[in-house]
Amino acid sequence: MVHDTSMAAYIPPNLMHPVGGTWTYVAGLVAGTIALHRAAHNSTGVVNIPVVIPSNASALKGSLLKSIEIDFEIATQVVTSADAVIYKVARGANLAVADPGSALAMTQSPAATETLKVEQHKLVLTLTTPIWLLNTEYVLVEFSIVAGAGGGTQKILGAVANYTARM
């Protein structure tokens, strides 16, 4: 049996789904990488981030999700807010609609006021109570950036899911 408490899974920008504003995939700051770039727009931009980690049909096996890190850059203009919500979604079966359920309790670090500046950021979302992921559900993070007056550009550089693997 494997029980590793230090597992991490990288979630690249090309797995993310942007909504609101004009988003494009561009070359990242590091050679060979991709970033999700939002053109200047003074509205709310949302990026849906699927958390792609192993699940299991048995309880207390698979992945115990503990935290998610979002790497992003505020390239121009200070933003009004940059916040995230984590959802555990029950998969829809036999053409049923998936049930997004409610947001999971979590803490966000650094403080919201620190993520508004023009610079690169790592936003850490730590679940108050870590969750085991069953094969009938998945986790989705909704990351929202409110650009504010004048609009600015932002880049999503990727995300990392931190979990315990038990197999």
Image: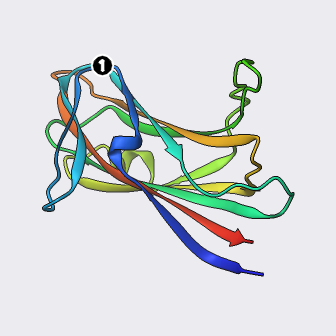
In the foreground, 41 or 91 = 91
- The reply to whether residue 71 is visible in this rendering is no
Residue 151 higher or lower than 119, as above or below = above
Query: Circle 1 sits in a helix, a strand or a loop, which is it?
Result: loop
Image coordinates of residue 99 in percent, x first then y, are: 73, 25
Looking at this rendering, what residue extends furthest in the right direction? 59
Residue in view at x 16 percent, y 35 percent: 77
Residue 31 sits in quarter: bottom left
Relative to 27, 121 lies left or right: right
Label 1, residues with CA under 10 Å away: few <14, some 14-19, many ≥20: some
Relative to 63, 38 lies left or right: left
Residue in view at x 34 percent, y 45 percent: 13
Q: How many marks?
A: 1
Q: How is the image coloured?
A: rainbow
Residue in view at x 76 percent, y 41 percent: 136
What residue would you read off at disc 1?
A: 43
In the foreground, 66 or 167 = 167
Quarter placement of the N terminus: bottom right
Quarter placement of the C terminus: bottom right
Image coordinates of residue 71 in percent, x first then y, are: 34, 54
Looking at this rendering, what residue extends furthest in the front direction? 94
Residue 7 sits in quarter: bottom right
- The reply to whether residue 96 is visible in this rendering is yes
Image coordinates of residue 59 in percent, x first then y, are: 87, 58
Image coordinates of residue 22 in percent, x first then y, are: 23, 22
Residue 70 higher or lower than 47, as above or below = below
Residue in view at x 23 percent, y 46 percent: 35
Residue 124 higher or lower than 144, as above or below = below
In the foreground, 62 or 76 = 62
Looking at the rendered structure, the kind of residue marked 1 is Ser
